[in-house]
Amino acid sequence: MRVLNERGGHFAALRNSTVLIYWPHGLGDWVHLGTILPLLEPSNRYFVTRFGDDFVSVIEGNAYARPLYSGARKLSDGAEQGARHLGIDPRRVAGALMDVALPDWLERHVRLARIDTLFYTDYPEPEGRAAFPFHTKARALAKSLVAAPRIAHFDLSKALASTIDFSVRPEINTFVESVLADYMQPADPLVLLALRGHTNERKAWPPVRARELIALLRARAARATFLLLDEGPVPPELAGAVFSFAELFRGEQPFAAIYKALLARAKLFIGVPAGPLHMASAYGCLPIIGIWQVHHPDWYDELNRNAVHLIGADVVRRGFARRPATVTKPEALKDTCEVVAQAVVPAQAVAARAYELL
């Protein structure tokens, strides 16, 4: 099969092909893919997959690409099914024919859909070094994936719309509501928390700060229910203060499918820049408080007028606000940001914003 990546202009030049986008990346990257898809060459047909349906379900119902499911929720690199990343070494991709190790489930899809091209990128991270209009992670990649004459037709001075379908299947909504009914009343405000930086633990917000925040919010909204989205056990500091997504919804449906239902049900999202924050931002209908202690919000999501980002002092001290992504970004595209005096964002600052949003 012909295998392409973002380099060399081969993908941007592709026409009238059926393309499998192999996307073995994090939840945030799946969200950003939803921004890139409508920019791609429309004469091609697009399918998208990875090993692990927890994230593939992000693209369910998408108008620009069809998700291909493995039947296994757990995320992996595919080694247990024969070869890591379909046997492809991303360093050797040069736009030519390559041997690809397709597991049985994917080979069936490739054959039935007559897929002739595979796209696999290691998704470079510009970290604010790219200037407007390619200042975000997704836009920087799109610059390499879309031919210049085509991308010139898009108004990049405006926020790019996400193409993620956030509608919820009735059976998913019924399931989520039945689970929540055991822990809260329908009128109780649901607050979603995401405290861990899955690709960089330095992004994490300390559980002790989250405990302080919950106490402050419950002083004003006693019936607020807090749902922790992070994987793994609840930190000891938060025992008894939050419910755990992993415990409430374990083993039932793909993560992204359930998360879409929770976004529609919630009153507020609070979290660090990881996949759940990026997906909540793309959703756009939910108030968001972002907690940024390592990176800068100008580098990632499109404008969300329902978002407030609290930026730790170290982000400013390290000069991240002076990188091209921030200094060239027009005011019309900038989110509401507030810099705090401490490196670790204090609970009081988050609570002050949460009072207003709730």
Image (cartoon, grey):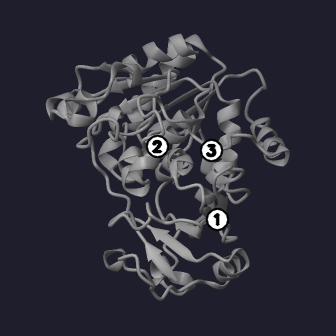
| Amino acid type of the residue that numbered disc 2 sits on in the rendered structure | Pro
Vertical order, 83 against 249 (above or below): below
Identify which residue is drawn at 84% across, 48% down: 171
Instruction: Kindly report which numbered mark, 3 or 2, lies closer to the viewer in this rendering.
Output: 3
Residue 233 in sight: no
**In what quadrant of the picture does the C terminus appear?**
top right
Residue 341 in sight: yes
Q: Quick one: SS at disc 2?
A: helix
Question: Which tag, 3 or 1, sits closer to the chain's start?
Answer: 1
- Residue 164's mark? 3
Q: For the view shown, which residue lies furthest in the front direction?
A: 149
Vertical order, 279 against 120 (above or below): above
Please state which of residues 270 and 89 is positioned toward the viewer in this rendering: 89
Residue 74 picture location, percent across and down: 59, 66
Residue 342 is left or right of residue 119, and the answer is: left
CA–CA distance between discs 1 and 2?
27 Å
- Residue 298's mark? none
Q: Which quadrant of the figure has residue 114?
A: bottom right
Query: What residue did someone put label 1 on?
Result: 73
| Amino acid type of the residue that numbered disc 3 sits on in the rendered structure | Ile
Query: What residue did someone put label 2 on?
Result: 236
